[in-house]
Image (cartoon, helix red, strand yellow):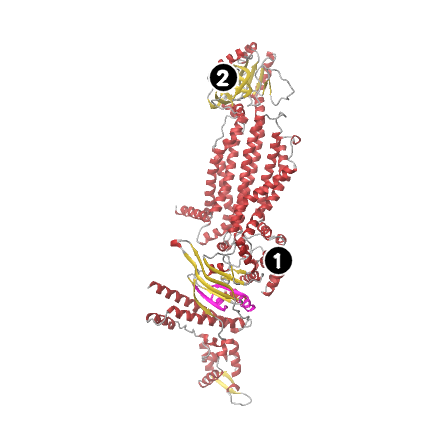
Amino acid sequence: MSEATDTPVLRARALRKEYGKGEGLVRAVDGVDLDVSAGETVAIMGPSGCGKSTLLHLLGGLDRPSGGEVLLNGRRVDNLSEKALSRMRRADISYVFQSFHLMEELTAVENVELSALMAGHSPRAARRRAEELLDQLGLAGRSRFLPSALSGGQRQRVAVARALSNQPLVVLADEPTGNLDSAATLDVLQLFNELHEYGQTLVIVTHDARIAATADRMFSMRDGTFVDETRLTGGTTGKLGALVGLGD
Amino acid sequence: MQQEVVLAMLAKEPSYGYQLRARLRDALGPLGDAMNAGQIYVTLTRLEKAGLLAAEKSADGADRSDRKVYALTPKGQQRVAEWIAEVSWPRPDLAEFHLKLIAAASAGLADPIAVVDTQRRELLRRLRDAQRAALAEPEHSKAALLLEGVVLRLQADLRWLEACEKNWTHRRSGS
Amino acid sequence: MGRILLVIRLALRDFRRRRTEAALLLIAILAATTTLTLGLVLRDAASDPYESTRAATSGPDVVASVGRSTDLAALEKLASAAGVTEHSGPYPVIGGKLEVSGRTSDVQVEGRDATVAVVDQPEVTQGSWVSDGGAVLEAAFANSLGASVGDPVTLGGRSFEVVGLAVTAAMPPYPGASCIVAGGCVNGAIPEDQNLPQALLHNPGLVWLTQADVRSLAAAQAPISYVLNLKLADPEGAQAFVDATAGGHSGAIRMQTWQSILAAATELARDSQILLLIGAWLLGLLAVASLSVLVGGRMADQTRRVGLLKAVGGTPGLVAAVLLAEYLLVALVAAAAGLVIGALAAPLLTESSAGLVGSAGTASLTVSTVGVVTAVALGVAVVATAVPAVRGARTSTVSALADAARPPRRTGWLIALSTRLPVPLLLALRVAARRPRRVVLGMASIAVTVSGIYVLMVLNTFLGNQPGTGAYSDAQVTVLRHVLGVWTVILLLLAAVNAIVITWATVLDNRHASALARALGATPREVSVALATAQVLPALVGAVLGVFPGGFLLFAAINGITGGDSDKTTLPVPWQLITLMLVTVLAVAGLTAVPAHLGGRRPVTDVL
């Protein structure tokens, strides 16, 4: 596992997002502070409607905050123009979605190379990188398959490969296992574990404790704010026996 | 270690004590690390005294317990059969934590939500450990299945904690 | 009762859920029903206009005239000839010049009784019938002069007031009038170097006055001719009657049968009817294109709805009723609105065609028109419903529920090709490749429009060259131009609606893909450009196909039907065709810009 350094890659300060007005005002995100260091995996957990997805959208520039700041590598990004935000999504930040969001008519490798093509890489370079990533993620033999011919777990792997194709600073994952059964969840779990060990900075929004448990830190979110932070590093397997009534 | 488990592990064939231990280790994986070797031999001796096991000294004649071959007596076999047929299940002891929250709240000893948070942190750490252990297991390992059970239980417990927190938050804001 | 309410409620809910689509569906069906209404109304108004005029005015079977008072007795004798059942006249006729608001035209002036004649009582379309000092102008003539009821006119130095406009079956309408004056007439354009006799009337119009007024004018002016209208026992034998009686009068009496008037009167009508027919066909094709896009787009959605209804216990009958109810509602509204709009718009066209063909029948909704339009609208509804309803009844509830939206097509080589292009083109090509059928429809729609415009251009040039060649008079050219103009407007409107419908369907269909492209780093501009380009590229192809072979073939077809001679026409020159294509592409780009812009700006997070 790579050591997390102290410089925050992604930083949020007093981040707010409000919808509606007057009586109908909804504070979806209400004053969130967050520092994510390079190589760190951070999980955000909470019940549905707590604002965790909105927070993720704000962090990735898919949505604009009502107040507060988002900084990427120390640079403010919440007030960037739409065009600059697009450039940021091409190069620095990528998404993994709950429902994969793969293009149904494109094969696995075509889906993966899409981000690289958007970023202006040559078709050949984009294809090579896409094949490499699929290879690394254990989908080498399936690169010419359409998403409909892949299992849920494999589809999410393709989506992750796409997210990684431009070597982003941060990968934001929104309920990456929300649409998967337990076997596929395990598959994706394994994948995030590998990413973590590889040193990829990850922010995962989830309501699945298992996914959250792969993180270095876990935030509990309630009504738009973080109510608790848990540092998960440390601990030994020695205590495990107690969990099943073994040992003393 | 439950006596019946040890008996049942011998049902396949008479075995040396170390063979028995290896079999248990294989089935439990990293969870078996907590297992105390001495404890198994204590259990074996007890079972032998109760007439459920017969111990034969090994060929070299040494009288050490790990050099003995243990086999089930007919009475032992009957006990194993009964145990297999039994419907027993470890009771989850949730009442204690539940009462802890109520006591903490009513006597003003602690904020029940803080208690829940602390507990959750602990459970998440355990979950992380169990999960890491599960992911480290080779494919088709017997122990992985057990670890999966641990993970699922912890998940269930965490969900219950979520419900506790929601409930106590509601009570606090409601009162 | 409860079930009917349920069905209606479900249908209304579905509309509220997808208002834009419902509105576009309505517009498309509306365009079709309006077109159909117009077509039918015009067909009624223009079909056999001479026949309807003949019936309305008790048109004569034979019109006989003499140029001298001395032959009057012979003419009067005709009235009692064998085979004649009824007659009117003889009426006095003189040639003259009519002046109205600064314009002068030759006229034949017929003196009539204020009372109703049993044969050839011209049908007054505006104002009233003749009275002393009051003139009635033939409708097409008045139309071309721009004269209307109440206008003062000067005839032979005397002032009259236009008291009415009327149509008659005794003479082809202006400017094809047959000659019943002694001096003789000449129709068509006259070569300038030719000197005509003083008495010869050039393109004379027809004016009715009272007999007294005609006689008093005649005293000061020209010699009086006389005209007699005859009804025969055997109208079909009019020519035989003429042959039999003409011999005995040594040619002093000129006679014209109703068949020869009919032939002269409907020459122009036939041409304009062909124009209307072609226009209706083009519009029909465009309407079908937009309907297919909309209904096709909703199909997948409906399949899932069927699954849902069945899952909660809907019988196949109920399912069909719910599906049908939606389209029936749209179709009925569209039919009603189409009938109203069509009926209101038709006079714009029939006004000119009334003048053109001299029809007494005004354009109006007949029961059969209402029936046909409604039936067609409902037919569309049933056809649109049939496929999903049958599919819904056949497929199991489970698979109907699982049926995702119509999966996009995969066109491998296009996807591979697009990787080499800049981002907006890459996206555009993929957007287009997802729905090849829609691209074809878009292309076809543009091709149809452009070939229509091509033909209109040819005809326009042809009409522009007319003055001087003699085939059509100025007035006829104006009228034909008017018809062409109205059809051009409708054609362009429907083509515009089509372009918007197709773009909108594309935008809706690509909601998800667009949002995803933006999440992956495409700018809103790139997405908007891609969505618009996906329409503009097929439009360019459509425009090219519309010129060649579309317009070329269509024009050849028109020539084939009308028996026209293509040698007489000038085909558009290359620069005109290139301009046409460019303008088409620019117009499509302009029309698609707004929906594409909206599609590109849509917040990503709402969609994903």
Circle 1: residue type: His
State whether residue C467 is above or below residue C402. Answer: above
Q: Is residue B127 left or right of residue A166?
A: left
* Number of dots carrying numbers: 2
Q: Are marks 2 and 1 on the same chain?
A: no
At 51% from the left and 18% from the top, the residue drawn is C154
The residue pinned by badge 1 equals A121
Is C269 or A116 nearer to us in this picture? Answer: A116
The residue pinned by badge 2 equals C159
Toward the top, the furthest residue is C70
Tell me if residue C499 is in the magenta stretch: no
Toward the front, the furthest residue is A75
| Quarter location, residue A120 | bottom right
Which chain is indicated by disc 2?
C
Q: Is residue C600 left or right of residue B105?
A: right
Q: Secondary structure at mark 1?
A: loop
Residue C121 appears anywhere in the view: no
Tell me if residue A219 is in the magenta stretch: yes
Is C160 or C337 nearer to us in this picture? Answer: C160
Which chain is indicated by disc 1?
A
The percent coordinates of residue A47 (x first, y second) are 43, 62
The percent coordinates of residue B126 (x first, y second) are 47, 72
State whether residue C24 is above or below residue A25. Answer: above
Q: Which residues are magenta?
A: A192-221
Circle 2: residue type: Ser
10 Å crowding of disc 2: few (<14), some (14-19), many (20+):
some
Is A51 or C255 nearer to us in this picture? Answer: A51
Is B58 or C530 nearer to us in this picture? Answer: C530
| Quarter location, residue C486 | top right
